[in-house]
Amino acid sequence: MKDKEKNFKPIYVLCALIGVTVLIIYFQFIFGDKLFMYKGSDDSLTYVPLYTSVVNKILTKDFSFMDLTRGVGEDLLATQHMIFDPFAILIYINGYLFGIKIIPKCLIWVNIFKIMCAGVFCYNYLKKFNVSIKSRILVSYIYSFCGYIMLWGQHYFFSTCLVLLPLLLSYIESIIVQDIYKDEILKLVFTVAVIGIYSVYFSYMMFMFAAIYTVLRSIYCHNKFKKIIKKISCVAGCIIFGLCFSAIIFLPSANSIALVGYRLNSNSNFVTQLIQHLQINYDKIYYKTILGRFFSNNAQGVDGIGTWINYFESPQLFFSVMLVLLIPQWLYKNIFKQKEKKKLIIFLIGFLLVLIMLFIPIGSIVFNGFSTWTGRHTFLLMPIFAVILSSTLDDILYNKNYKFLIGEITCFFSLVILNYFMYLENATRVSKFILIINMLLIYIINILFNKISNNDKAGIINQKFFDRNLVYKVLTVLICINLIIENYPTVNMQQEIAQAYTIEILNENEIYYNSNSINAINYLNENDDELFRVAKDYFDIDGNESSIQNMNSFSSYSSNYNKYYREFLMSVFPLTLDGETGYHTPDFRKSYSAMRLLGAKYIVTKNDIVSEKLLSKFNNVNVYQFENFLPIGFLYTGAIERNEFEKYSYFEKQGFIFNKAVLENSEYEVISEKLNNSVINNPIQEVVSLSFENADIGKDVVKVINDNSSDIKFNASGDESYIDIELDYDKYQYDNSKLIYNATLNVDTYGDLIIYWDTGNGFNEKQYSSRRIEPNRPYQIEQEIPSSTRAIRFRFNMTGIKFDNPKIAIMESDNSSIKRLMKNISNYKITSESDGEINYNISTNENGLLCFTIPYSDDWKMYIDNKKVETFRINIGFIGTYLEKGCHDIKLLYEPDSFIIGKMITGISVLILCSYLLYNKVRNKKIIS
């Protein structure tokens, strides 16, 4: 060690530094009215509802992995990194003791605790290297507020990775460099087990990185082949044994992600995927983002509007401005001053791997498990940055090894780069201020390093008052300024995508905990003891409010982890999806066909629905029961083959699926002969084409006719941008029918399309559907409208909108279809002991196909009259089986086989460990005696 711990405890100093900075950055969250929840961010959209769901499960003693309040039923293990985050235990304890409303208040304290732990664990990791205490303190302080922790810590709470990673690496480093490391083995095994329980996704990243780290460091530190193999084998054994300990959670989580997770769903083999990924290239924006992120998270503006993907998903590389200044010095030393050929080769290999991780898409894709190419894996570089910074800082301050020319060149190029980012179109006053301060700090730190290395020929600083301790103190002040000025806007000044909520949302009648909505849901739960779903056609805050308001719904943010359910939506109700995460748009809530097919018995709404039965009112919230509805389990007597089904349009599919079950081709061949199949073959009664020739066009719409007269586009130029089409009302008056408007849109710019309908009293603001339209791709529009519609209005704000083949389809109404389906059942009662156990007593009038609108998974086991039966996919994404006519008791249990296997592996691992510890204890006693 270059200095000793004499009169101070370094950990206390580090914690004090972190504490003061936390108080400044998070002042409004600690002492003010802000909650650590951001509008539009996943802390509010996903984490708080999910934590609430877990607490509710603990309170009700429901320990199944299935959660029916998320989407139409979701395996909680698909969100493993959220619910098994070790820090989430603090949230669960508080929620259990003080109620679910305490959960949003806990988030800031958990985040601060993570920041503290990250700094302390980084300090312990740096202890394994020959760096000074003061450098360890300063660099660990930087690590606590690095870009990854500050950004991902407030969005997906991924900052847990940077708490666990230095812990993992510190034990691996001890095993590599020490001759006696028996105590480190158990610590490493335990750390691996915690990581395995925390997340399969991050386990994959960390253990791949750990494997590379172990191999390179072992070869770097040792010359004897046997010793290198021994070190690598020891670390590998610890990781495998640790994963065996975590198998009770790790295995079913991995199974859930691999078998039903849509992100890993691919029909291509590994080699084909690898070749496809190698052909991908980053665009210029990515490299610009990489460059800016070394200097500041906010180089492209607070909110990162101009970054590669978005503010969060772009690579996170900020590790204080000092890293920018010292990386060239570190490269020079390790490349041009390294005398050992072996160490130089190892260094170059490691450096090449880092370049691949950052600059070549295949590096990102491999580390992200071949699921996506984002910057999430860049957390792996943060401990490496810590080692680079601390070792180079010591080399400068103790060996006076700072190259003047390299420093000057670095400062010059830093000035050029920061000047470039200051004049970007999306640069704001805040981002410009940050960049100016960072530039000044780089120059000041450069002067300090030149002075301590005797490069200050001009004598800017008086040598009489200048020593190493002073440099550390000045550096600490400068780094504090850098981290506070950088991170305060990140946390407090976001406006575009993530503005923090205030504590008002915890009050009654405010979004999350809206008393009217909750009272309506409680009313239904108290008066209906069966298992049912509730449709809710408005948001209190977002789709995951169903977990907080304790209702079985079907519209939920990021609830489509199950690839089969997602496949169903894409085939039949594609407009309910919004992007890769499968966020259900508000239009899903306006699709009564989707609601009814998925088992909605009631609807909670702020509108008046004259066609349905009003049960109760809670101020402005009304509770209706659908006159005709399908239970979560219902019976088909006819079927259609999947290949045949996919030939039809979306609205035709919606008609068919209310009449015939959709079976995969192999199942159809076996089962179709057992069915009656005496149901309608085509639900479409008539299709009427629409014309814009006689449409009423608003005064702010510009009609553009190209050379091809049939190619007509419309441009919006003001508030009065609308097109009204009058319908031939008499044509649509079929008994028991519904209308579907259908068209394909092409637009030149982003914009919103709003569809209104007039049922005889003019266009009503409550009768509309809104969609976000993207340019340069066909966009299918379908909208169910009342059969009494006289006219349709299209309001839009984009240019170059073109309607292709607009038409009205007249179809059999859902009520008629549901009535016919329910004739197959004479009596039923469906209840649930827990989210993972559904009991169904049913009497059927015919043989048929029983469909449960719960996403298909092999982990659901079905028992009919106490006999286990085979299940299969029905309606593309749900659980089905063949059921003979008569009375039956049916039980549906969520029993993951992988959980049973994992439990056995964990049990055996615990037994082996206990036997080993007992053996050691007896052995040590014999040695002592």
Image (cartoon, helix red, strand yellow):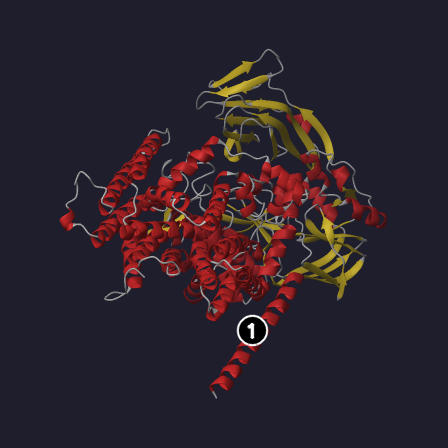
Left or right placement of residue 133 versus residue 375 in this view: left
Observer-nearest residue: 93 or 717?
93
Secondary structure beneath disc 1?
helix
Observer-nearest residue: 422 or 849?
422
Q: Position of residue 27 (x, y in %)?
A: 29, 52
Residue 112 figure quarter: bottom left
The quarter in which the N terminus is drawn is bottom left
- The residue identified by callout 1 is 913
For the residue carrying disc 1, how many other residues have a C-alpha within 10 Å: few (<14), some (14-19), or many (20+)? some
Observer-nearest residue: 85 or 909?
909
Residue 64 figure quarter: bottom right
Residue at the image point whose x is 57% and y is 35% from the top: 280
Q: Residue 725, relative to residue 115: is it above or below?
A: above
Mark 1 is on which residue type?
Leu
Q: How many marks?
A: 1
Observer-nearest residue: 163 or 617?
163
Q: Position of residue 675 (x, y in %)?
A: 83, 49
Q: Residue 310, relative to residue 626: is it above or below?
A: above
Q: Position of residue 88 (x, y in %)?
A: 45, 60
Asked whether residue 510 appears in the rendered view, the answer is: no
Q: Quick one: which residue is furthest to the right in this view?
A: 673
Q: Quick one: which residue is furthest to the top in this view?
A: 707
Q: Position of residue 143 (x, y in %)?
A: 36, 52
Asked whether residue 95 appears in the rendered view, the answer is: yes
